[in-house]
Amino acid sequence: MSEVGDNFETLGSSAKDQLRAFVERIERLEEEQDALAADKREVYAEAKGNGFDTKALRKLIKIRKMDDNKRREEEMILDTYLSALGMLLLD
Amino acid sequence: MSEVGDNFETLGSSAKDQLRAFVERIERLEEEQDALAADKREVYAEAKGNGFDTKALRKLIKIRKMDDNKRREEEMILDTYLSALGMLLLD
Amino acid sequence: MSEVGDNFETLGSSAKDQLRAFVERIERLEEEQDALAADKREVYAEAKGNGFDTKALRKLIKIRKMDDNKRREEEMILDTYLSALGMLLLD
Amino acid sequence: MSEVGDNFETLGSSAKDQLRAFVERIERLEEEQDALAADKREVYAEAKGNGFDTKALRKLIKIRKMDDNKRREEEMILDTYLSALGMLLLD
């Protein structure tokens, strides 16, 4: 596959082609990822422009991915600890 | 737009629809991002399976995004510092 | 301060000493940071061993850094959005 | 240890004290971490003020943590890939 040159090896031509193909496939995927990230920033900017709070929006979307029971349990434990330290907002 | 209820407000119906629309647009984009991330992991796994070093592959792709002059300058400064501390691999 | 060598420059001796001093100061700080991070992991492990939920503990500590009014406002907005999408746990 | 209240439990007093102790220990460690992070930012700012390139300085410190043989091998593989795509700076 390769012979040792200066302080690097020289890949054979088929290995070179394979490497280039992997690189280009990854670069195309990363271009698509960058485009989606830009689209998402646009949606958040639009939401903000319409008066929505983007920090709350992100939390909302994160919560929507959670299983209800797990969420209920997590909130119960956190409220237990908040109450123990007198930090519940109702306190 | 909203009246103050218990310890949260109640959005009017149009604001509710708007919020849901933003949430669903963001969720669709995040699904596409997850799919692309999975595709990228697959390509790296395939490259690894073909004997390529994925850490070097990631660095290669990062370097390909750099302007040559900037890259040359950064490498020159780093080599200057490595040489100053006797850490050049040739040393 | 330095003459251009192969593809790097050679720092003068005072610049070399200065560079080494900065490097060693940073490395000492990073050693201390690593030690503190290890201590923190130990405290969390101890808390876990005593039946406490470390995820909730982290959130509790994050919340303790927040200003009460800001926290109240953030929770109110999030609950408003959760309620708008029928996601309040009481719903 | 605790009875179920509204939608959270009430910790017994010893559990409350234990929780508070863990929280305060973690907060003290985080204060020290913040102080060290501030010190490190200061050293980098001082180095920058003395004409050193902080990006290269960070890389230098990262490289100093690497085992020489591992570093030599990683650089050899990366140079092999760079050469394969005609991206060696000497090319």
Image (cartoon, coloured by chain):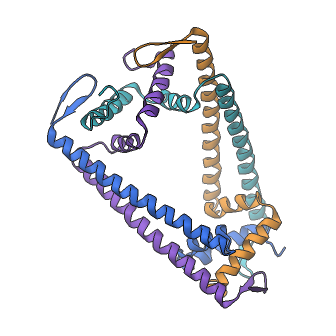
Chain colours: A orange, B cyan, C blue, D purple
Q: Describe residue D89's horizontal placement relative to residue A32 as left or right.
A: left
Picture coordinates of residue A68, whole percent (x, y):
82, 65
Farthest right residue?
C91
Q: Residue at the location (37% across, 42% down)?
A: D64
Check the image and report above or below for C42 versus A83: above
Picture coordinates of residue B8, whole percent (x, y):
71, 77
The quadrant of the rendering that contains the C terminus of chain B is top left
Foreground residue, A73 or B54?
B54
- The image quadrant of residue A64 is bottom right
Q: Describe residue B77's horizontal placement relative to residue B25 as left or right.
A: left
Foreground residue, C41 or B4?
C41
Residue C10 is at least partly visible in this image: yes
Foreground residue, A44 or C34?
C34
Check the image and report above or below for B81 versus C63: above
Residue A86 is at least partly visible in this image: no
Farthest top residue?
A13
Q: Describe residue A71's horizontal placement relative to residue A34 as left or right.
A: right
Foreground residue, C83 or C20?
C20
Q: Residue at the location (33% across, 45% down)?
A: D54
The quadrant of the rendering that contains the N terminus of chain B is bottom right
Q: Residue at the location (45% across, 22% down)?
A: D79
Picture coordinates of residue D6, whole percent (x, y):
79, 85
